[in-house]
Amino acid sequence: MIEVKELVKRFDGFAALDGATLTIPTGSVYGLVGPNGAGKSTLIRHLTGIYRQDGGTISVGGEDIWENAALKARIAAIPDDWYYFLQATVRDMMRFYRGFYPNFNMERYEKLKDVFSIDEKRTIRRLSKGMQKQVAFWLALCCMPEYLILDEPVDGLDPVMRRQVWSLVMGDVAERGTTVLVSSHNLWELEDVCDHVGIMDHGKVLLERSLVQLQDNMVKLQVVFQDGMDTVPPELPVLHASRVGRVHTLIMRMNAQEATERLMAYQPMLVDAVPLTLEEIFIYELGGADYAVKDIVL
């Protein structure tokens, strides 16, 4: 389990993290989402022991990560800007990783050579961005980590390789109980792989729930009211409302059954509950229309 409590980090007086708190259950895939500048990458650098917090605590498997080499050997990370030595080949970086990860699995390395189909003797800097990401996954998965931390992990990969990579990661979660943290703006993809989600903004974690709980706590309804009722009753707790013709689309912070029962008091002609996507939940949890796409006249 990863536990972060009241984490604070300041840079020249600016609070990049301002009391961030989250819990990542063992063996789960946790999606960390938020707008640019929310503090996601700063949080990840604390979880990997790169930054030391100004306040709060970090516990990974019950241990403090700061200057804990034995714990870091159980954590593999793929940052958005993955580092490699400029003249290094894939095999050179493999040897480098083996020196830091005592559980590095050479048998797995040889098997994954066929999966990624990249010549291990090629210089990494001469590979495409997508191929460099494949190398990063190739090496990280061979470290046999207990904790896998990913920042925009599949950016640059083609659809087929995205599926392949997620299949390998989810296989480790199922077979080895690997705990995975994924930070990404690709919300539709997170929806397919994550079982827990945390939403960050302004250095804080606004909420965190299992994906099922998150989707059950907010609902989209398409409603047609009786003739003569063109507007949504003001007493309804609606986060956002729009209308096309006679069909009103309402976003309400409650489950579908409760929302439908509230609407039945107005004897609507039609009520249809529609599941929200993670992207829609993200938008409305962060302020609804304030985060919607704005029309700009140029």
Image (tube, rainbow, N blue to C red):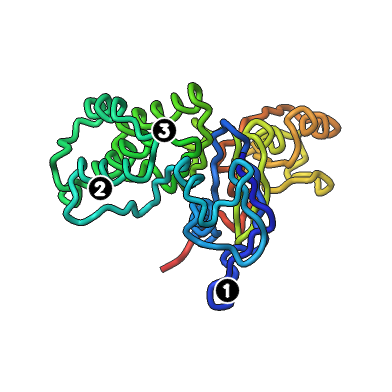
**Residue kind at label 2, given as amino acid type:** Lys
Q: Quadrant of residue 248?
A: top right
Which image quadrant: the C terminus? bottom left
Residue that badge 3 annotates: 144
Camera-side mark, 3 or 2: 3
> Callout 1: 10 Å neighbours few (<14), some, many (20+)?
few
> Callout 3: 10 Å neighbours few (<14), some, many (20+)?
many
Circle 1 SS class: strand
Single out the residue that lies furthest toward the bottom.
12
> Callout 2: 10 Å neighbours few (<14), some, many (20+)?
some
Q: Position of residue 149 (x, y in %)?
A: 47, 44
Residue that badge 1 annotates: 14
Residue that badge 2 annotates: 129
Q: Quadrant of residue 105?
A: top left
Proximity of marks 2 and 1: CB atoms separated by less than 8 Å: no
Considering only order in the chain, which callout, 2 or 3, is on the residue closer to the N terminus? 2
Q: Position of residue 73 (x, y in %)?
A: 44, 43
Using the image as rendered, state which of residue 190 and residue 111 is in the foreground.
Answer: 111
- The answer to whether residue 34 is left or right of residue 119 is right
**Residue kind at label 3, given as amino acid type:** Met
- The answer to whether residue 135 is left or right of residue 215 is left
